Amino acid sequence: MESETVPEIPVDVAFEHALGVSDAEHTLLTQGEDDRVWDLASVSKPLTALGALIAVDRGLLDLDDQAGPEGATVRHLLAHTAGYAFDGADPVSAVGARRIYSNTGFEVLADHLDEATGYDLEDWMEQTVVQGLALRDLEVTGSPAAGYRGSIRDLLALGRELLEPTLISVELWREATSVQFPGLAGILPGYGRQRPNDWGLGFEIRDGKSPHWTGAGSSPRTFGHFGQSGSFLWVDPEAGLTAAFLGAERFGETHVRIWPSLTDEILARHRDGGGG
């Protein structure tokens, strides 16, 4: 899908980066090289989550299958409530008691997905997500929590799928993008403790969080993920938009400063009929 020619959005950074905006049908704007491959870091998680949801939709996996610590399920792993720490094999909390953002949970999820589908995770992701979305640059090697690499054009294709699903049912999409285990507090990395810290099934949900990496104008239904490589993908169903950012500098104060205003500029242009 080719980008429309629309005015660029100023991005106040000194490092190399790429930005993209799309609606559910086509790309509205790209800045930077749309095919350049960058580290996605934790933006890998929504991709792995989609792979798991496809298995659920095909009847190979159930969200309430036991997985991880005793009492935990696939749903708990996807929603960061299985009790695992950020990293480390030993649980640090009772299942369902706290929202603890965890790479380990996604590693355990991947092992369970291997068993349920009969495929190695890399093969499953290639056959379902990569081929299903006709992705051209995504590299699904390394950690399913934070090891993938990809491009802006591929993240926008994922964003379009998450605006209007084609690989999973609408019913499952609604569940995945709704709050799981409501009311749980927790730390949103880089932004501190959130009460509540709402998540869906592999996707962080904005709701009324403050501070946050999306914009003041983002709808409460906005969901997505950001990564320590300085990456983000958000999907705003109310606006009918998705946007992605990738860059050469790791997440830090600059990203905290620019991402909300960048998001608000994207949304304002859309409301005003200015494309991206």
Image (cartoon, rainbow, N blue to C red):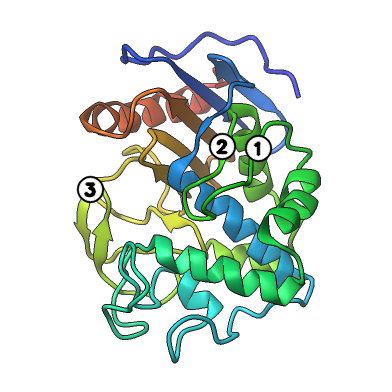
Amino acid tagged 2: Arg
Q: Please give left or right for residue 34 compared with residue 252 in the image.
A: right
Q: Position of residue 131 (x, y in %)?
A: 80, 45
Q: Position of residue 168 (x, y in %)?
A: 74, 61
Q: Position of residue 74 (x, y in %)?
A: 55, 77
> Can you say whether 25 is above or below 162 in the image?
above
Quarter that holds the C terminus = top right
Quarter that holds the N terminus = top right
Residue 138 marker: 1
Q: Within 10 Å of the Cα at label 2, are there few (<14), some (14-19), or many (20+) other Cα atoms?
A: some
| Mark 1 residue element | loop
Amino acid tagged 3: Tyr
Q: Within 10 Å of the Cα at label 3, are there few (<14), some (14-19), or many (20+) other Cα atoms?
A: few
User: Which is nearer the N-term, disc 3 or disc 2?
Assistant: 2
The residue depicted at 44 percent of the width and 91 percent of the height is 70
In this rendering, the count of numbered labels is 3
Residue 191 marker: 3
Q: Pick whichever, 246 or 144, lies toward us.
A: 144
Amino acid tagged 1: Leu
